[in-house]
Image (cartoon, rainbow, N blue to C red):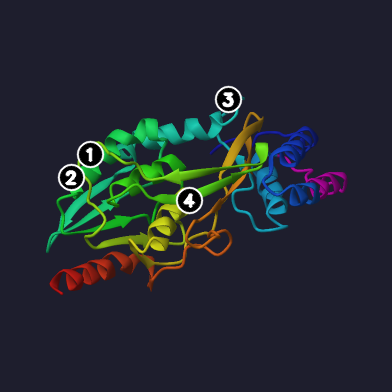
Amino acid sequence: MTTPTKISPAPVIDETARLLTEHYTFPEIAEQVAGLLQRRLAEGAYDVDDAEELARLVTADLQSANGDRHLRLKHHTEPVPEKKGAATLESMRREFDTSLGGVPRVELLDGGVAVVELAPMLFPLEWAAEPLSAALTLASRAQALIVDLRGNRGGDPDTVAFVCSYLLDERTHLNTMSWRRGDRTEQSWSLPHVPGARFGGSKPLYVLSSGTTFSAAEELAYDLQQLGRAVVVGEPTRGGAHPCQGWTVHPHLEATVPVGRAVNPVSGTNWEGTGVQPDVPCPADESLARARTLALAKLAS
């Protein structure tokens, strides 16, 4: 049993409100929510005993204006470094080391259908390129491929582009990020060359989704769906399309603030708030069997 971490809410709220006002991708919403946090602080709404409870209360208020699920005050059980992004990075590294680099499953099913599970995250590309390349190269020989994102909570947009590069034949515009800082846009494209072998852009491809699938994992599903490259099978995803950064505001608390938004070149929009809608809706625990049936029927035809 962990001991609750005593907390003084005012410095945490002040710093979170400052970060929100300075960095949030929607400045008008930032002002509105920062004001709400200060009012709630003055009312005593955050007079609680421990950091975890404060994180829960503040997150509810942060998300109250527009439901942005990337906008959070995250509690960390272990003390986290002060450097920007360090809290998330440290937690991700532990998961990377215990998940075969984010590819816990590569399997060949009957009929030449392969399954590659990407979970629990799409880790930073400098870590994940080697295990992803190995898994996707191995699966490249399959007749059809199922990419399982049901347990994937998000990660690195560069890793999304890397994975897409194995599933397409040509360099392709995948997504555009609109960043608040500098009022600039940045396009994401698949790579012209990849390590190993591509599965390519013509064989049957299915992506499994669930209510857990979030953020960069949603982008992977959405990009492939909008390009007409993959059939998404399963449940609507969680609906978080805003890339975010994290700042440590207390030894056990990290404010995560979206600093940009995604714009898909095909749809002209993104999956924020709505989630990626499956082409073949079904319960997540039935989606693998459903996708395998679809793949075998496609190959037979």
Name which of mark 3 and mark 4 comes first in the sequence. 3
Q: Indicate which disc residue 175 carries.
A: 4
- Amino acid identity at mark 3: Pro
Residue at left offset 48%, top offset 53%: 214
C-alpha gap between disc 3 and disc 1: 32 Å
Mark 2: few/some/many CA within 10 Å (<14, 14-19, 20+): some
C-alpha gap between disc 1 and disc 4: 25 Å
Asked if the magenta segment contains residue 166, the reply would be: no
Name which of mark 3 and mark 2 comes first in the sequence. 3
- Amino acid identity at mark 2: Leu
- Report the residue marked by disc 3: 81
In the rendered image, residue 277, in percent from the top left (x then y), is placed at: 46, 67
In this orientation, which residue lies closer to the viewer: 212 or 161?
161
Asked if the magenta segment contains residue 37, the reply would be: yes
Question: Which mark's residue is nearer the viewer, 4 or 2?
Answer: 4
- Magenta range is 34-49
Work out whether 148 lies above or below 134: below
Q: Is residue 191 left or right of residue 173?
A: left
- Report the residue marked by disc 2: 138
Q: State yes or no: discs 1 and 2 in contact (Cβ < 8 Å).
A: yes
Residue at left offset 46%, top offset 47%: 154
Residue at left offset 64%, top offset 48%: 71
- Report the residue marked by disc 1: 134
What element does badge 1 sit on? helix
In the rendered image, residue 232, in percent from the top left (x then y), is placed at: 36, 65
In this orientation, which residue lies closer to the viewer: 123 or 219?
219
Mark 1: few/some/many CA within 10 Å (<14, 14-19, 20+): some
Quadrant holding the C terminus: bottom left
In this orientation, which residue lies closer to the viewer: 229 or 291?
229
C-alpha gap between disc 4 and disc 2: 27 Å
- Amino acid identity at mark 1: Ala
